């Protein structure tokens, strides 16, 4: 028995990374803003969303990991093979546009968090852009993954910030497992925020990056169970962090009537006189880490996806000369995202909203294609979804489609 547990632990440690990293990047500058606004505007009443968020994240990420392990191919590669180049090209164009808007939001998060420590964006943004570029250009997959895993663990800062904010633990815990009173559903802003909190969990880039990471890591069917554990652990950790972000802002900003924030840095700044300098430092440092982390992953995910979909060489273990399209696309996304944030008076908020609208268009398509692929017996063999898991997966897809359409057509979207 002890030997079996040691074997399982060794296998888990060998495959950990893709699921844990991908789930945690979801708590980027945009995600932190969403959770912060949820807590600041509605207190503890949106904590119930964390449980369905976690279930949805586990289901979708496990499907991607399984497809990558069984087929040895990335998601965009499979879409091209099974559904043709025309559809793949359309998806790649949309994904580049959506992800570029997200990259801009990440560099905006870097700028905002560093300005809280009195560092100009004209210093922080170029320096961080250079750092994330060098990390990928000069590193290999194993080295880059280790850096990303460390960045994922740093999210624990939000847990400490939540504790230091002095929340009402009883109310927070009860609100996490019970639906709010019916009266809140008469508020259109509450419904819109509910859609936003749930919808921010599953993004198209996550599915492509997850599967590409599994493939590049070289995980075989022998590591399937350990990979599932990686997905589950990553999903639970990232949503525990999300829970504490909501709690921290509910216990400080909501209690003191400071419900309106424009960006995640505003939440950290407003928290300083309410929860103390340590909570402020942890929240601001967490925002910087999250933004820098996502500014590395999002361009990388886009480069993987486009190159796989178009049949170009890709991968961190290849040199620049071996995969020029991969590295040039990564470079252009980072340079462009950083440059836009430094551009005076650029309408960053409007562009970010547009990227989210396009995200709502793209996500249902990706979800349906994933489900068609994973239920293809010629492709997946005995590893297709079983009846129960298929029911859960299709229900998740339907919910994602409904939420995406709600976001697309909601007032103010």
Image (cartoon, rainbow, N blue to C red):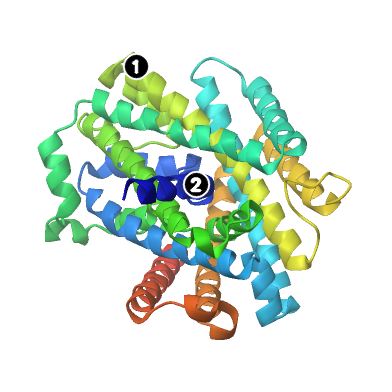
> Which mark lies nearer to you, 1 or 2?
2
Q: Secondary structure at mark 2?
A: loop
Tag 2 or tag 1, which sits nearer the N-term?
2
Which residue was labeled with disc 2?
16
Task: List x then y, in percent, for residue 235.
Answer: 39, 51
Q: At x 27% / y 20%, what residue is drawn?
A: 275
Q: Compute the Cα span from label 1 to label 2.
A: 31 Å
Q: Which residue: 69% across, 55% down?
A: 304
- Residue at 49 percent across and 42 percent down: it is 28
Q: Is residue 26 visible?
A: no
Disc sitting over residue 134 in the figure? none
Disc 2: CA contacts within 10 A as few (<14), some (14-19) or many (>=20)? many
| SS for dot 1 | helix
Q: Which percent across, then down, holds residue 273?
A: 30, 17
Disc sitting over residue 278 in the figure = 1
The location of residue 352, given as percent across then percent down, is 56, 49
Give the percent coordinates (x, y) of residue 308.
72, 63
* 390 left or right of 101 in image: left
């Amino acid at each position: 028995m002890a030997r079996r547990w040691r074997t399982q632990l060794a296998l888990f440690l060998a495959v950990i990374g893709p699921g844990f990293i991908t789930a945690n990047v979801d708590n980027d500058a945009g995600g932190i803003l969403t959770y912060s606004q949820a807590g600041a505007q509605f207190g503890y009443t949106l904590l119930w969303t964390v449980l369905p968020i976690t279930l949805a994240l586990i289901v979708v990420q496990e499907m991607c990991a399984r497809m990558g392990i069984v087929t040895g191919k990335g998601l965009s590669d499979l879409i091209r093979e099974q559904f043709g180049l025309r559809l793949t090209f359309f998806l790649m164009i949309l994904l580049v546009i959506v992800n570029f808007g997200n990259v801009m939001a990440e560099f905006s998060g870097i700028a905002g968090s560093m300005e809280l420590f009195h560092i100009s964006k004209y210093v922080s943004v170029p320096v961080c852009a250079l750092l994330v570029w060098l990390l990928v250009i000069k590193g290999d997959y194993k080295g880059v993954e280790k850096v990303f895993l460390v960045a994922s663990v740093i999210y624990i800062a939000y847990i400490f910030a939540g504790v230091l904010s002095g929340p009402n633990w009883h109310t927070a815990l009860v609100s996490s497992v019970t639906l709010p009173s019916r009266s809140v559903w008469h508020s259109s802003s509450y419904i819109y925020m509910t859609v936003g909190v749930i919808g921010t969990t599953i993004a198209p880039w996550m599915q492509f990056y997850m599967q590409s990471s599994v493939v590049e890591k070289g995980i075989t069917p022998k590591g399937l169970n350990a990979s599932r554990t990686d997905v589950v652990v990553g999903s639970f950790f990232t949503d525990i962090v999300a829970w504490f972000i909501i709690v921290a802002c509910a216990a400080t900003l909501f209690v003191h009537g400071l419900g309106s924030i424009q960006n995640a840095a505003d939440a950290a700044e407003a928290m300083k006189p309410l929860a103390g300098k340590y909570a402020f430092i942890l929240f601001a440092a967490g925002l910087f880490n999250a933004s820098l982390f996502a500014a590395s992953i999002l361009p990388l995910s886009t480069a993987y996806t486009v190159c796989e979909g178009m049949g170009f060489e890709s991968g961190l273990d290849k040199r620049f000369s071996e995969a020029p399209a991969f590295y040039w696309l990564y470079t252009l996304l980072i340079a462009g995202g950083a440059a836009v944030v430094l551009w005076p008076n650029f309408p960053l908020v409007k562009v970010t909203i547009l990227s989210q609208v396009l995200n709502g268009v793209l996500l249902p398509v990706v979800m349906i294609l994933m489900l068609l692929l994973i239920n293809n017996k010629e492709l997946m063999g005995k590893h297709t979804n079983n009846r129960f898991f298929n029911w859960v997966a299709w229900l998740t897809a339907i919910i994602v489609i409904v939420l995406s359409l709600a976001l697309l057509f909601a007032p103010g979207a």
